[in-house]
């Protein structure tokens, strides 16, 4: 099995780029009653002008680029179509934001231009949407490219037809809410591996034991004492297009569920069934402004159970050591936005589990703490104030897909706002997947247990990533300076990679004497590891504020260093 070597795509910028014009909210109400279905068109040429900004990261192509936009609304259905072209051609990112007559955001979305440079957005206005003129802002690749147009919406002209009653057939059951993809009942063909086979393999030398399941089988049947027979060696099972690696302790833990009972005739089954992708599509949450999910690979139902001779079966609710599973991908999808999700039956929703590309970038590897129904999904999140062309747009989108960053609201990210100490602590905890012990070991009186950041601050404190401004104050809402962010970032890197992996840098910044003594060593090690760079190359600006976009980029840099 390929070992998971995760990394963000190389095209994620390693340095702070110029800050382009962002799409901003706002818009004026217009007179109602104008003809629905009206269109408006606008064209803007990017001047290529930009203002330099200090930071730790680098620069992007801001060459001129023409962008056009046309907005239309269908009077009968309320369907809005926004189309146009990008002069640079295929694969150019385009962001749209639609503002209601009252000034609120009605719709946010992102897409890429087709082979001929064309793009299209489409959505349906709600029946109670306000009538009047809607302002449309479209941002394209190139930093400063921004075009504004509008459309006017009046009442839907067609009445809603009355509901039609359809009599149920005799004995029919009431319609049930949508359910997760289901495994069909019935006997499942399994490839049998007996005790003598495992015993023989166990003496063949070091390394994992590998079983290839013949075609026509949906898993394996193992002796109940397989964990004991494997010793310290893991078990790799290749079944069709799926590969799993199970640690022997998990198999032994399964047997302990029947401790004290006779296991004569008992066996362990591992079953993997690939489900129809269309069934998983039905369970995806409804697309909202700026947020949507799509299937992007295999949908699997995984099961590991101990079966007794009497016919009863027991399963572990969680594994003491995660089971590594390799999922197939749809290579036409955006790999940086993919993740493995499991169907949470209690919540009735897909829940993010993680996942990392293998060395060939053709498989997604996830370490699963339990078995259920899993799917490879692509997660898209667009923010109105982070349009296509914004220097941090791709990084923010990527880390949002990994559920590391989130907005200040459903549609706004506030990229230029100063990042708070609590927000950055939460970023690091999510990035490293740290878990709190469940008990508070710090004495910060300004971190109430009811706050959204309470568990993240506790986890960061337990891991040694943070210290308070004093013994009793963390000051969670205070802004972060660049030197504070650098210290916490280096601590997180060292926690994951090991402090011994870092050496000090010989680089001295022009404002080295302005760096606090408690931050000097961390910044030196962070510079040597490539996590930090100066602002403009020669100054570090240790007391300058760090923005939410800068904090996101800094975390992305650390991930690339850890996973690359």
Image (cartoon, rainbow, N blue to C red):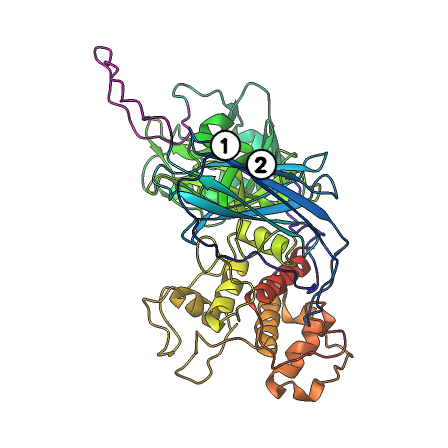
Total tally of numbered discs in the picture: 2
How far across and how far down the image is residue 427, in percent? 52, 63
Q: Nearer the viewer, residue 231 or 562?
A: 562
Residue sitting at the far left: 170
Magenta residues: mostly which secondary structure? loop
Q: Residues within 10 Å of mark 2 (few under 14, many from 20)?
A: many
Answer whether labels 1 and 2 touch (C-beta < 8 Å).
Answer: yes
Q: Residues within 10 Å of mark 1 (few under 14, many from 20)?
A: many
How far across and how far down the image is residue 360, in percent? 71, 41
Q: Is residue 367 visible?
A: yes
> Which contiguous range is marked in magenta?
157-183
Which residue lies under the disc numbered 1? Answer: 300
Which residue lies under the disc numbered 2? Answer: 327
How far across and how far down the image is residue 12, in percent? 68, 54
527 vs 409, left or right, is right
Relative to 209, is 550 above or below? below
Nearest to N terminus: mark 1 or mark 2: 1
Q: Nearer the viewer, residue 408 or 181?
A: 408
Relative to 399, is 252 above or below? above
91 vs 382, left or right, is right
> Disc 1 and disc 2: Cα gap in Å?
9 Å
Secondary structure under the numbered disc 1 in the rendered image: strand
Q: Nearer the viewer, residue 342 or 15?
A: 15
């Amino acid at each position: 099995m390929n070992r998971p070597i995760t990394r963000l795509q190389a095209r994620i910028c390693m340095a702070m780029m110029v800050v382009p014009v962002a799409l901003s909210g706002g818009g004026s109400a217009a007179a109602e009653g104008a003809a629905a279905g009206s269109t408006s068109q606008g064209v803007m040429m990017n001047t290529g002008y930009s203002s330099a900004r200090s930071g730790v990261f680098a620069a992007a192509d801001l060459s001129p680029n023409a962008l056009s936009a046309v907005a239309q609304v269908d009077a009968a259905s309320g369907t809005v179509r926004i189309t146009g072209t990008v002069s640079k051609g295929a694969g150019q990112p385009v962001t749209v934001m639609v503002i209601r007559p009252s000034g609120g955001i009605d719709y946010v979305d992102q897409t890429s231009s087709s082979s001929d440079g064309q793009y299209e957005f489409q959505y349906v206005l709600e029946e109670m949407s306000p009538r009047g003129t809607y302002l449309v802002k479209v941002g394209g690749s190139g930093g400063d490219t921004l075009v504004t147009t509008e459309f006017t919406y009046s009442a839907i002209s067609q009445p809603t037809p009355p509901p039609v009653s359809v009599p149920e057939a005799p004995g029919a059951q009431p319609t049930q809410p949508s359910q997760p993809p289901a495994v069909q009942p019935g006997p499942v063909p399994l490839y049998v591996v007996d005790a003598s086979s495992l015993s023989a393999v166990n003496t063949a030398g070091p390394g994992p034991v590998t079983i290839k399941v013949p075609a026509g089988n949906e898993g394996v049947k193992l002796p109940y004492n397989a964990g004991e027979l494997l010793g310290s060696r893991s078990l790799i099972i290749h079944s069709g297009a799926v590969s799993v690696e199970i640690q022997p302790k998990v198999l032994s833990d399964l047997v302990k569920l029947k401790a004290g009972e006779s296991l004569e005739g008992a066996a362990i089954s591992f079953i993997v069934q690939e489900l129809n992708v269309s069934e998983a599509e039905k369970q995806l949450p409804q697309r909202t402004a700026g947020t949507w999910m799509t299937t992007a690979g295999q949908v699997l139902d995984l099961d590991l159970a101990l079966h007794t001779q009497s016919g009863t079966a027991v399963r572990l609710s969680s594994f003491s050591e995660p089971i590594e599973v390799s999922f197939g991908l749809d290579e036409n999808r955006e790999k940086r936005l993919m993740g493995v999700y499991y169907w949470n039956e209690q919540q009735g929703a897909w829940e993010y589990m993680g996942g990392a590309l293998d060395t060939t970038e053709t498989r997604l590897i996830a370490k699963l703490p339990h078995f259920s129904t899993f799917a490879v999904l692509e997660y898209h999140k667009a923010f109105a104030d982070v349009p296509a062309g914004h220097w941090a747009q791709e990084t923010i989108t990527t880390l949002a897909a990994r559920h590391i960053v989130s907005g200040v609201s459903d549609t706004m990210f506030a990229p230029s706002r100063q990042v708070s100490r609590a927000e950055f602590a939460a970023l690091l905890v999510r990035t490293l997947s740290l878990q709190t012990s469940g008990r508070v070991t710090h004495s910060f009186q300004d971190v109430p247990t009811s706050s959204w950041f309470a568990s993240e601050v506790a986890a960061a404190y337990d891991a040694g990533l943070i210290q308070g401004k004093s013994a009793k104050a963390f000051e969670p809402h205070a802004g972060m300076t660049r030197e504070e962010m650098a210290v916490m970032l280096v601590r997180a890197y060292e926690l994951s990679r090991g402090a011994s992996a870092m050496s000090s840098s010989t680089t001295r910044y022009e404002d080295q004497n302005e760096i606090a003594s408690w931050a000097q060593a961390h910044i030196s090690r962070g510079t040597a590891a490539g996590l930090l760079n100066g602002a403009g190359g020669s100054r570090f600006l240790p007391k300058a504020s760090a923005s939410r976009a800068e904090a996101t980029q800094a975390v992305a840099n650390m991930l690339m260093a850890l996973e690359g």
